[in-house]
Image (cartoon, rainbow, N blue to C red):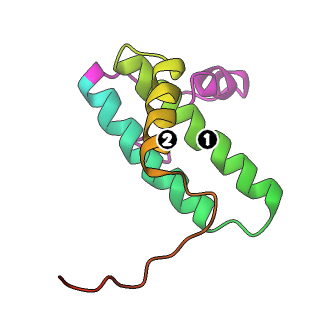
Amino acid sequence: MPVYNKLIRDRILEIIAADGLAYNSRVLQPEEHLTEIKNKLYEEVKEFDETTTKKEAIEEMADVLELLHAALKVYDTDFDELEAVRVKKKEKRGGFDEGLYLIDVEDK
């Protein structure tokens, strides 16, 4: 029996049961849930880094976005609040759209 010990999507247990397989699972406490969301984010970002096609990249970005939505729920907030913070930071410091790459800065 393979051991996973990781956060899974909400319908995975239904899919496993539909295949006639037995499993062990549990519901995480909020603190554990957030830790596992962070762990899964690292995994998904690594997978995004390893993509070689646009389709694969979009799939992995969707997984990252889904995890951000889950983290927002744990923090009892919503995507609108996150987006407002993103816009405010972008207005103040800019975004990452231009692909600027800082090499060095002269010392004072």
Q: Which residue is mark 1?
A: 63
Q: Which residue is mark 2?
A: 91
Helix, strand or loop under label 1: helix
Provide residue 18's location: percent of width, then percent of height.
72, 22
Q: Residues within 10 Å of mark 2 (few under 14, many from 20)?
A: few
| Residue at image coords 33%, 23% | 28
| Residue at image coords 51%, 75% | 101
Image quadrant where one finds the C terminus: bottom left
| Residue at image coords 38%, 46% | 39
| Residue type highlighted by circle 1 | Asp
Provide residue 12's location: percent of width, then percent of height.
62, 28
| Residue type highlighted by circle 2 | Glu
- Compared to 105, does 2 lie above or below? above
Farthest front residue?
108
Q: Nearer the viewer, residue 7 or 68?
A: 68
In this rendering, position of residue 92 left or right of residue 15: left
Farthest top residue?
76
Provide residue 57's location: percent of width, then percent of height.
72, 56
Q: Does residue 93 belong to the magenta stretch?
A: no
Q: Nearer the viewer, residue 65 or 87?
A: 87
- Compared to 76, does 61 lie above or below? below
Helix, strand or loop for the magenta stretch, by majority: loop
Q: Nearer the viewer, residue 55 or 24?
A: 55
Q: In the image, which disc is placed on residue 72?
A: none
| Magenta stretch in the rendered image | 1-30
| Residue at image coords 54%, 51% | 95
Lower position in the chain sequence, tag 1 or tag 2: 1
